[in-house]
Amino acid sequence: MTKLSVNINKLATLRNARGGNRPDVLQSALDIERYGAQGITVHPRPDERHIRYADVRALKPVLTTEFNIEGYPNASFIELVLAVKPAQVTLVPDPPDVLTSNAGWDTRTHKDELKRVIARFKEAGIRTSIFMGTDMELIARAADTGTDRIELYTGPYADQYAQDRQAAVAPFIRAAEQAAEVGLGLNAGHDLDLDNLAWFKARVPGLLEVSIGHALVCDALIFGMENTVQLYLRELR
């Protein structure tokens, strides 16, 4: 079964809006694991507007599922990841002030930079993934960086799903086939939800993991977190 990694950034956003420790991000992560999720994802940013670097350090010793840290590979992020040693690091090409990840890497332009960073993480025993669009050439070039996996940016799929779900998923099927051809594992994430997840999972081959945060936390406001995690797991079965 494709693994569900829950991105808990939005829980940290809620906590930070009021100050204090409600919701308790660490306890929430442990609860989400207990409800059945197979991983926890965080995306610390330089301004710490949601997940803080201190949260990342505190989460690692208590989590029992796979810990995935996403982020732009600046010096402070690299230092954090090497210190924490998560199961997986996912590199995204976000500038510091971007609201949310909205594009994949240009692995033609940034190949050498990615190759250097990925080599450091792999030397530390950390599985690597890079955030990618569906351009076939760039996916082929991703293999040259030494990464273990790619994470497909599924925003365009979610945007088109309601109008034409067959057309929406088609480039992701081709991208998944290309990834497999060049020996890369496949993750996916961004705007996947209870409406569009099952269709994506059923048609995209080799999908190892999805990372879902915003939609899942929004659904949890209605259905409760435990029930929501189970609903997403059901869509992946």
Image: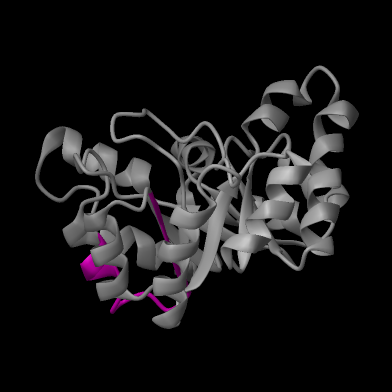
Quarter of the image containing the C terminus?
bottom right
Q: Is residue 99 left or right of residue 139?
A: left
Determine if residue 209 is in view: no
Residue at 48% x, 42% y: name it. 220
| Closest to the observer, 162 or 81 | 81
Q: Is residue 122 above or below residue 180?
A: below
| Closest to the observer, 80 or 195 | 80
Quarter of the image containing the N terminus?
bottom right
Q: Is residue 222 left or right of residue 205?
A: left
Q: Is residue 78 left or right of residue 224?
A: left
Residue with the most extreme left position: 20
| Closest to the observer, 14 or 118 | 118
* Number of numbered labels in the structure image: 0
Q: Locate residue 188, reporting x and y percent.
A: 64, 50
Q: Colour scheme in the image?
A: one colour
Q: Is residue 63 magenta?
A: yes
What's the magenta region?
56-71
Residue at 29% x, 29% y: name it. 97
Q: Quadrant of residue 3?
A: bottom right
Q: Is residue 177 magenta?
A: no
Q: Locate residue 77, reporting x and y percent.
A: 28, 57
Q: Locate residue 123, reporting x and y percent.
A: 43, 81
Q: Is residue 233 above or below residue 167?
A: below
| Closest to the observer, 174 or 3 | 174
Q: Locate residue 181, reporting x and y percent.
A: 84, 62
Q: Is residue 104 above or below residue 112?
A: above
Q: Quadrant of residue 129?
A: bottom right
Residue at 36% x, 29% y: name it. 98
Determine if residue 194 is in view: yes
